[in-house]
Amino acid sequence: MVKATSLFFYLLLAASATITVATDHIVGGHLGWNPNFNYSLWSNNQTFFVNDLISFRYQKNIYNVFEVNKTGYENCTMDGIAGNWSSGKDFIPLDRPGMYYFLCGNGFCFSGMKVAVKVVPLSTPPPSSSHGHADDHSASPATGRLRPSLASFVAFAALWIGCRI
Ligand SMILES: *[C@@H]1O[C@H](CO)[C@@H](O)[C@H](O)[C@H]1NC(C)=O
Ligand SMILES: *[C@@H]1O[C@H](CO)[C@@H](O)[C@H](O)[C@H]1NC(C)=O
Ligand SMILES: *[C@@H]1O[C@H](CO)[C@@H](O)[C@H](O)[C@H]1NC(C)=O
Ligand SMILES: *[C@@H]1O[C@H](CO)[C@@H](O)[C@H](O)[C@H]1NC(C)=O
Ligand SMILES: *[C@@H]1O[C@H](CO)[C@@H](O)[C@H](O)[C@H]1NC(C)=O
Protein backbone atom coordinates (compact mmCIF):
# COMPACT_ATOMS: atom_id res chain seq x y z
CA MET A 1 0.00 0.00 0.00
CA VAL A 2 2.86 2.33 0.84
CA LYS A 3 4.41 1.46 -2.49
CA ALA A 4 1.18 2.11 -4.36
CA THR A 5 0.76 5.45 -2.64
CA SER A 6 4.23 6.64 -3.55
CA LEU A 7 3.71 5.50 -7.11
CA PHE A 8 0.55 7.54 -7.17
CA PHE A 9 2.42 10.65 -6.09
CA TYR A 10 5.18 9.93 -8.55
CA LEU A 11 2.65 9.79 -11.37
CA LEU A 12 1.00 12.94 -10.08
CA LEU A 13 4.36 14.70 -10.14
CA ALA A 14 5.10 13.41 -13.63
CA ALA A 15 1.68 14.58 -14.79
CA SER A 16 2.13 18.10 -13.47
CA ALA A 17 5.58 18.27 -15.03
CA THR A 18 4.06 17.20 -18.36
CA ILE A 19 1.30 19.75 -18.45
CA THR A 20 3.39 22.75 -17.47
CA VAL A 21 5.84 22.31 -20.34
CA ALA A 22 5.35 25.03 -22.91
CA THR A 23 7.17 24.84 -26.21
CA ASP A 24 9.16 27.80 -27.47
CA HIS A 25 8.71 27.84 -31.24
CA ILE A 26 11.73 29.62 -32.68
CA VAL A 27 10.59 31.19 -35.93
CA GLY A 28 12.68 29.82 -38.79
CA GLY A 29 14.62 27.51 -36.48
CA HIS A 30 18.34 28.17 -36.66
CA LEU A 31 17.82 30.46 -39.66
CA GLY A 32 15.77 32.83 -37.55
CA TRP A 33 13.71 35.77 -38.80
CA ASN A 34 15.22 36.80 -42.13
CA PRO A 35 14.15 37.55 -45.71
CA ASN A 36 13.69 34.90 -48.39
CA PHE A 37 12.46 32.14 -46.14
CA ASN A 38 9.12 30.41 -46.55
CA TYR A 39 7.62 30.75 -43.08
CA SER A 40 4.44 28.98 -44.18
CA LEU A 41 6.44 25.79 -44.51
CA TRP A 42 7.96 26.37 -41.08
CA SER A 43 4.59 27.10 -39.51
CA ASN A 44 2.80 24.17 -41.15
CA ASN A 45 5.46 21.81 -39.87
CA GLN A 46 4.56 22.14 -36.21
CA THR A 47 1.69 22.30 -33.79
CA PHE A 48 1.17 25.37 -31.63
CA PHE A 49 -0.68 24.87 -28.37
CA VAL A 50 -2.18 27.51 -26.14
CA ASN A 51 0.46 28.84 -23.71
CA ASP A 52 3.33 27.96 -26.03
CA LEU A 53 5.68 30.76 -26.97
CA ILE A 54 6.71 31.96 -30.38
CA SER A 55 10.10 33.65 -30.48
CA PHE A 56 11.73 35.78 -33.10
CA ARG A 57 15.53 36.07 -33.34
CA TYR A 58 16.91 38.72 -35.66
CA GLN A 59 19.23 41.69 -36.15
CA LYS A 60 17.40 44.34 -34.23
CA ASN A 61 18.50 47.41 -36.14
CA ILE A 62 17.23 45.98 -39.42
CA TYR A 63 14.19 43.85 -38.67
CA ASN A 64 11.30 43.91 -36.20
CA VAL A 65 8.00 42.17 -35.49
CA PHE A 66 4.42 43.38 -35.71
CA GLU A 67 1.29 41.44 -34.93
CA VAL A 68 -1.47 42.31 -37.38
CA ASN A 69 -4.72 40.73 -38.57
CA LYS A 70 -5.34 38.62 -41.65
CA THR A 71 -5.75 41.65 -43.90
CA GLY A 72 -2.38 42.98 -42.76
CA TYR A 73 -0.76 39.59 -43.21
CA GLU A 74 -2.06 39.01 -46.73
CA ASN A 75 -1.37 42.53 -47.93
CA CYS A 76 1.78 43.36 -45.95
CA THR A 77 0.10 46.29 -44.22
CA MET A 78 -0.33 47.30 -40.59
CA ASP A 79 -4.06 46.54 -40.66
CA GLY A 80 -5.33 45.34 -37.31
CA ILE A 81 -2.03 46.00 -35.55
CA ALA A 82 -2.05 44.35 -32.14
CA GLY A 83 1.55 44.57 -31.00
CA ASN A 84 5.12 45.40 -31.94
CA TRP A 85 8.50 44.09 -30.81
CA SER A 86 12.04 45.10 -31.62
CA SER A 87 14.44 43.64 -29.06
CA GLY A 88 16.03 41.23 -31.53
CA LYS A 89 14.99 38.31 -29.33
CA ASP A 90 11.29 38.54 -28.66
CA PHE A 91 9.27 35.92 -26.83
CA ILE A 92 5.55 36.23 -27.51
CA PRO A 93 3.05 34.14 -25.56
CA LEU A 94 0.36 32.42 -27.60
CA ASP A 95 -2.22 32.63 -24.86
CA ARG A 96 -5.45 32.05 -26.77
CA PRO A 97 -6.48 29.58 -29.46
CA GLY A 98 -6.93 30.88 -32.97
CA MET A 99 -4.89 32.53 -35.68
CA TYR A 100 -1.96 34.88 -35.07
CA TYR A 101 -0.35 36.91 -37.84
CA PHE A 102 3.12 38.43 -37.62
CA LEU A 103 5.15 40.40 -40.11
CA CYS A 104 8.27 42.52 -40.38
CA GLY A 105 8.06 46.22 -41.09
CA ASN A 106 10.50 48.28 -43.18
CA GLY A 107 9.25 46.57 -46.35
CA PHE A 108 10.68 43.17 -45.46
CA CYS A 109 7.23 41.60 -45.35
CA PHE A 110 7.34 41.67 -49.15
CA SER A 111 10.51 39.55 -49.01
CA GLY A 112 8.70 36.80 -47.17
CA MET A 113 9.06 38.00 -43.58
CA LYS A 114 5.54 37.14 -42.47
CA VAL A 115 4.16 34.18 -40.64
CA ALA A 116 0.67 32.92 -39.79
CA VAL A 117 0.29 30.63 -36.82
CA LYS A 118 -2.69 28.52 -35.84
CA VAL A 119 -2.89 27.93 -32.10
CA VAL A 120 -4.98 25.00 -30.89
CA PRO A 121 -6.39 24.37 -27.41
CA LEU A 122 -4.41 22.05 -25.16
CA SER A 123 -7.13 19.44 -24.81
CA THR A 124 -7.80 19.00 -28.51
CA PRO A 125 -5.32 17.03 -30.58
CA PRO A 126 -5.18 18.89 -33.90
CA PRO A 127 -6.89 17.19 -36.83
CA SER A 128 -4.08 15.92 -39.02
CA SER A 129 -5.41 17.37 -42.24
CA SER A 130 -6.78 20.72 -41.07
CA HIS A 131 -3.87 22.92 -41.98
CA GLY A 132 -1.63 23.27 -44.96
CA HIS A 133 -2.72 23.81 -48.49
CA ALA A 134 -4.04 21.19 -50.84
CA ASP A 135 -0.69 21.04 -52.61
CA ASP A 136 1.27 20.79 -49.39
CA HIS A 137 0.91 17.10 -48.58
CA SER A 138 4.56 16.35 -49.21
CA ALA A 139 5.56 18.35 -46.16
CA SER A 140 5.50 16.17 -43.10
CA PRO A 141 2.37 17.11 -41.18
CA ALA A 142 2.75 18.12 -37.60
CA THR A 143 1.99 15.03 -35.61
CA GLY A 144 -0.24 15.85 -32.68
CA ARG A 145 1.79 15.73 -29.52
CA LEU A 146 -0.45 14.25 -26.92
CA ARG A 147 -0.67 16.30 -23.81
CA PRO A 148 -2.87 14.23 -21.55
CA SER A 149 -4.63 16.24 -18.95
CA LEU A 150 -3.82 15.95 -15.30
CA ALA A 151 -7.22 14.36 -14.82
CA SER A 152 -6.51 11.52 -17.21
CA PHE A 153 -3.18 10.87 -15.50
CA VAL A 154 -4.86 10.74 -12.14
CA ALA A 155 -7.57 8.48 -13.52
CA PHE A 156 -4.97 6.22 -15.03
CA ALA A 157 -2.96 6.13 -11.80
CA ALA A 158 -6.04 5.36 -9.75
CA LEU A 159 -7.01 2.58 -12.12
CA TRP A 160 -3.51 1.14 -12.10
CA ILE A 161 -3.32 1.19 -8.31
CA GLY A 162 -6.86 -0.13 -8.07
CA CYS A 163 -5.90 -3.19 -10.11
CA ARG A 164 -2.88 -3.89 -7.96
CA ILE A 165 -4.24 -3.68 -4.43
C1 LIG B 1 5.58 28.61 -49.41
O1 LIG B 1 5.36 27.24 -49.67
C2 LIG B 1 3.98 26.93 -49.88
C3 LIG B 1 3.84 25.41 -49.98
O2 LIG B 1 4.74 24.89 -50.91
C4 LIG B 1 3.50 27.63 -51.14
O3 LIG B 1 2.12 27.37 -51.34
C5 LIG B 1 3.68 29.14 -50.96
O4 LIG B 1 3.34 29.81 -52.14
C6 LIG B 1 5.13 29.46 -50.60
N1 LIG B 1 5.22 30.86 -50.28
C7 LIG B 1 6.09 31.66 -50.85
C8 LIG B 1 6.07 33.08 -50.40
O5 LIG B 1 6.88 31.25 -51.67
C1 LIG C 1 9.94 19.77 -40.36
O1 LIG C 1 10.27 19.20 -39.12
C2 LIG C 1 11.21 18.16 -39.18
C3 LIG C 1 11.38 17.57 -37.82
O2 LIG C 1 11.53 18.55 -36.84
C4 LIG C 1 12.53 18.71 -39.75
O3 LIG C 1 13.49 17.69 -39.87
C5 LIG C 1 12.27 19.33 -41.11
O4 LIG C 1 13.45 19.93 -41.60
C6 LIG C 1 11.18 20.36 -41.00
N1 LIG C 1 10.86 20.87 -42.32
C7 LIG C 1 10.73 22.17 -42.55
C8 LIG C 1 10.34 22.54 -43.95
O5 LIG C 1 10.92 23.01 -41.68
C1 LIG D 1 -5.95 42.95 -49.22
O1 LIG D 1 -6.15 44.24 -49.79
C2 LIG D 1 -7.14 44.25 -50.80
C3 LIG D 1 -7.14 45.63 -51.43
O2 LIG D 1 -6.90 46.61 -50.45
C4 LIG D 1 -8.47 43.90 -50.19
O3 LIG D 1 -9.48 43.90 -51.16
C5 LIG D 1 -8.38 42.53 -49.57
O4 LIG D 1 -9.59 42.23 -48.89
C6 LIG D 1 -7.24 42.48 -48.59
N1 LIG D 1 -7.07 41.11 -48.09
C7 LIG D 1 -7.69 40.69 -46.99
C8 LIG D 1 -7.42 39.30 -46.59
O5 LIG D 1 -8.42 41.41 -46.35
C1 LIG E 1 -8.06 44.18 -39.98
O1 LIG E 1 -8.07 45.46 -39.38
C2 LIG E 1 -8.51 46.47 -40.26
C3 LIG E 1 -8.32 47.79 -39.55
O2 LIG E 1 -8.85 47.76 -38.27
C4 LIG E 1 -9.96 46.21 -40.64
O3 LIG E 1 -10.41 47.19 -41.54
C5 LIG E 1 -10.05 44.85 -41.32
O4 LIG E 1 -11.39 44.52 -41.57
C6 LIG E 1 -9.47 43.78 -40.41
N1 LIG E 1 -9.41 42.54 -41.14
C7 LIG E 1 -9.85 41.40 -40.64
C8 LIG E 1 -9.68 40.17 -41.50
O5 LIG E 1 -10.35 41.32 -39.50
C1 LIG F 1 4.32 49.56 -30.11
O1 LIG F 1 4.05 49.05 -28.80
C2 LIG F 1 4.05 50.03 -27.80
C3 LIG F 1 3.81 49.32 -26.49
O2 LIG F 1 4.51 48.13 -26.43
C4 LIG F 1 2.96 51.03 -28.08
O3 LIG F 1 3.00 52.06 -27.10
C5 LIG F 1 3.14 51.62 -29.45
O4 LIG F 1 2.06 52.47 -29.75
C6 LIG F 1 3.22 50.53 -30.49
N1 LIG F 1 3.46 51.11 -31.80
C7 LIG F 1 2.68 50.84 -32.82
C8 LIG F 1 3.09 51.44 -34.12
O5 LIG F 1 1.68 50.14 -32.71
Image (cartoon, rainbow, N blue to C red):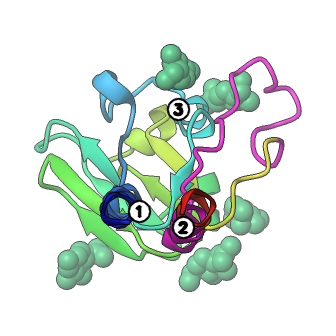
Residue 59 sits inside the magenta stretch: no
Query: Answer yes or no: do the residues labelled 1 and 2 have beta carbons within 8 Å?
Result: yes
Q: In this view, does 18 lie above or below 88?
A: below
**Residue at image coords 81%, 49%:** 130
Ligand 1 in which quarter = top right
- Check mark 1 vs ligand 2: CB closer than 8 Å? yes or no: no
State which quadrant residue 85 falls in: bottom left
SS at mark 1 in the image: helix
Q: Nearer the viewer, residue 9 or 48?
A: 9
Mark 1 nearby-residue class (10 Å; few <14, some 14–19, many ≥20): few
Q: Which mark is residue 42?
A: 3
Left or right: where 146 falls relative to 105: right
Q: At 18% across and 40% down in the image, what residue appears?
A: 62
Q: Is residue 59 left or right of residue 3?
A: left
Residue marked by disc 2: 149
Q: In which quarter of the image is residue 83?
A: bottom left
Q: Using residue 150 as the reference point, say whether residue 25 is left or right of it.
A: left
Mark seen at residue 138 = none
Q: Which kind of residue does numbered mark 3 sit on?
A: Trp
Which portion, as a residue range, is magenta?
Answer: 129-158
Label 3 CB, ligand 2: below 8 Å?
yes
